[in-house]
Image (tube, rainbow, N blue to C red):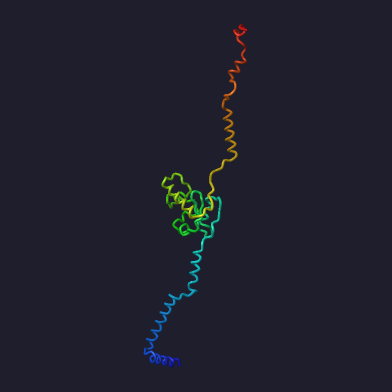
Amino acid sequence: MALQLWETLKEAITVYTGLSPATFFTILALLWAVYHVLSGLFGPSDNHYQPRSRELEEQVQPPPPPVQLGEITDEDLKQYDGSDPKKPLLVAIKGQIYDVSQSRTFYGPGGAYALFAGKDASRALAKMSFEDKDLTGDISGLGPFELGTLQDWEYQFMSKYVKVGTIKSTAVPVSDETAAAESAETKEGDAAKPVKDGPSETAAVKAEEPPSVNDAAKE
């Protein structure tokens, strides 16, 4: 039965199209392929492009508003180096901490300035250095040109990013015992100084001496 239908179909193709069955099916296959290519170019399916559009929306979403941290230590600052995407991306310059989350492409992991994230990078920015030894807030010994470069960086940070805190100073406070000892030393030094005001010892001795013989005769 199927063979008879196939023979009838071939005869119909030859009669109505004037083409052999092989040629007819080849042309049909080519038209089907062209249709799929054109539909892919001009009529994209919503389901095909939906995941990509969601990814683009996630990338375009703005970062969360900066959170003020106040005064923190260098050690606390390290946790904001971009390794945790849920935390803001911070960089400090001259002890002032700025939120650079909007420039994650540069300061985030894999970025050109990723080494500066989570640190006070004042010295490295001044010297335009990427060495670990320069990733510090110590700017002592820098020349005028390097200090000028650092100033330019600071102006750029102030104009582009939000300041969210400062780095806590590591200076050792003077204890009460040290202050008391210094006060005692000062008092001892003052007591050791001779008293210049008032009568001297020599004058007091002369006042206590008895009158001489000549003075008694005159009287």
The one nearer the camera, 134 or 204, is 204
Q: Residue 9 falls in which quadrant of the image? A: bottom left
Counting from the top left corner in percent of width and height, residue 55 is at: 49, 67
Query: Which residue is located at x 61 percent, y 16 percent?
Result: 207
Most extreme residue toward the front is 159
The one nearer the camera, 10 or 204, is 204
In the rendered image, the quadrant that contains the N terminus is bottom left
The one nearer the camera, 19 or 74, is 19
Q: Is residue 216 above or below residue 102?
A: above
Counting from the top left corner in percent of width and height, residue 213 is at: 60, 8
Q: Residue 196 falls in which quadrant of the image? A: top right
Residue 140 relative to residue 65: left or right? left
Counting from the top left corner in percent of width and height, residue 210 is at: 62, 12
Query: Which residue is located at x 45 percent, y 76 percent?
Result: 43
- How many numbered discs? 0
Query: Which residue is located at x 40 percent, y 82 percent?
Result: 31
Residue 110 relative to residue 201: left or right? left
Query: Which residue is located at x 57 percent, y 29 percent?
Result: 190
Counting from the top left corner in percent of width and height, residue 73 is at: 54, 50
Most extreme residue toward the top is 217
In the rendered image, the quadrant that contains the C terminus is top right
